[in-house]
Each structure stands twice: as C-alpha cells, then as structure tokens.
Image (tube, rainbow, N blue to C red):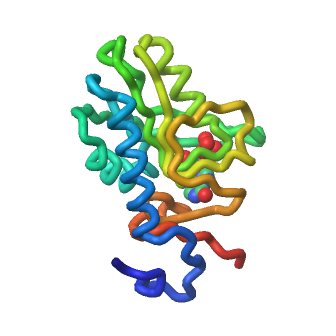
Amino acid sequence: MSSARDYQTKPRPFELLLAQDEIARRIGELGQQITRDYQGRTPVLIGVLKGCVIFLADLMRAIKIPVEVEFISAESYRVGARQEEEIKLDRRFTNALRGRHVLIVEGVVDSGRTVITINQELAAVEPASVEVVTLIDKPASHRRKLDLKYVCFTLGNEFVIGFGLDNTQRYRNLPFIGRMLED
Ligand code: IMP
Ligand code: MG
C-alpha cells in the first residue's frame, strides 16, 4: 500500500479521497454481485479506454464466472465554438456481440454522453442485454436520465484523479483516488 504522500510531485495538487483498501473492498462486492447476476452466462466486458484500465483489471479478477474482454476507445472533443462535445469512438461494434450479455466498464460517468453514445452504437448489433459498470458516478452532472446498474462510488461535482483517471493524461498511475485541489 502506498499513501498520497508517496507520489513524487511538488506541489501535490490533490488530496486523498478514496483509499486503496476501500476501493478494493467495493470492487470485491461488485464482482460478487456480477458473479451472482450472470450465473450460467459468459458476459462480455467492454472496457472504455483509457479510464477503465485499473478498474477493469481488478474487477475482472473479482468475477468468478467466465468472461470475455473487449476494449473501445472514446474521446470527447470540442468542435469549433460549439458548447457540446463530440464523442468519437475508435471502432464500430461487430456482429460478434449479437445476442451477448454486455457490460460496459467505465472509469467515470460524468455527463453520461460517452455511455449514451456507446449504448446507441451497441443497439445496432442487438446484444441480449447491456448494463453499465462504473468506478465513479457523478449523478449531479448527468444530462439525461441514466440507468447505471453497477456503481462503485457516487460522488458530487469534484474532479478526481488516480486509479486510471487522469487530469490532462497525468495521475492515472496513482493506486488510490484523489480529489484535485483548486489552484
Ligand atoms: P461523460 O461526460 O460521462 O461523457 O464523460 C466524459 C469524460 O470526462 C470521461 O470519460 C472522463 O475522461 C472525463 N471526466 C469527467 N469527470 C472526470 C473526473 O472527475 N476525473 C477524470 N476524468 C473525468
Ligand atoms: Mg480524461
């Protein structure tokens, strides 16, 4: 186990929010719940890069039934002066997912636009079911009604980093979740 103090940066622009043991305990619980819910099936976990990486690695080992793993890369970017961000997915889903039980594995659901875009793409290949698993949910930021079945932690509007989550591509390697401090 390492502490927030181990991270070698000065100044340290974050504070500890969720410790490693607390995260591990919640992922263990979610793994048990998914194991029960998908008994007798082989779900396909689709990790949404890059924020999913550490969460997915731990979650898949906490699930005690067979699973398959796929990845999709999602990037949001602003187009010109428009307020709305476009979500760009790096590939389209194939017919291999037709009739399968799919779990979308996210690091953080904020506005919900990424998850909604992935869901719309997935619908075209007619999976048997689609549910979302997320490490962090920020319900106050959702722009549309979302049905997230498996949530590790629910937060307010704070910006968090670590355990796969970044701030301008940094801090993904922190083994805990920290809250960015105002500068
Ligand atoms: P969405 O708004 O639900 O589509 O999420 C868009 C993306 O915003 C996420 O995939 C993250 O990359 C990023 N994001 C939102 N909130 C946070 C946060 O607290 N920490 C790190 N990334 C975040
Ligand atoms: Mg990001």
Question: Would residue 77 be seen by someone viewing this image from the given angle?
Answer: no
Q: In which quarter of the image is the C terminus?
A: bottom right
Residue 105 point in image, percent of width and height: 43, 40
Q: In which quarter of the image is the N terminus?
A: bottom left
Q: Which residue lies furthest to the front in this view?
A: 36
Depth order, front residue of 21/166 = 21
Residue 176 position (above or below residue 105)? below
Location of residue 8 (image quadrant): bottom left
Residue 175 position (above or below residue 40)? below
Depth order, front residue of 142/124 = 142
Residue 23 point in image, percent of width and height: 44, 62
Q: Residue furthest left?
A: 66
Q: Residue at x 58, y 42 (%)?
A: 76
Depth order, front residue of 181/22 = 22
Q: How many tags in the picture?
A: 0
Q: Which residue is drawn at 65% across and 56% down?
A: 155
Q: Which residue is drawn at 60% across and 48% down?
A: 137
Question: Would residue 123 be seen by someone viewing this image from the given angle?
Answer: yes
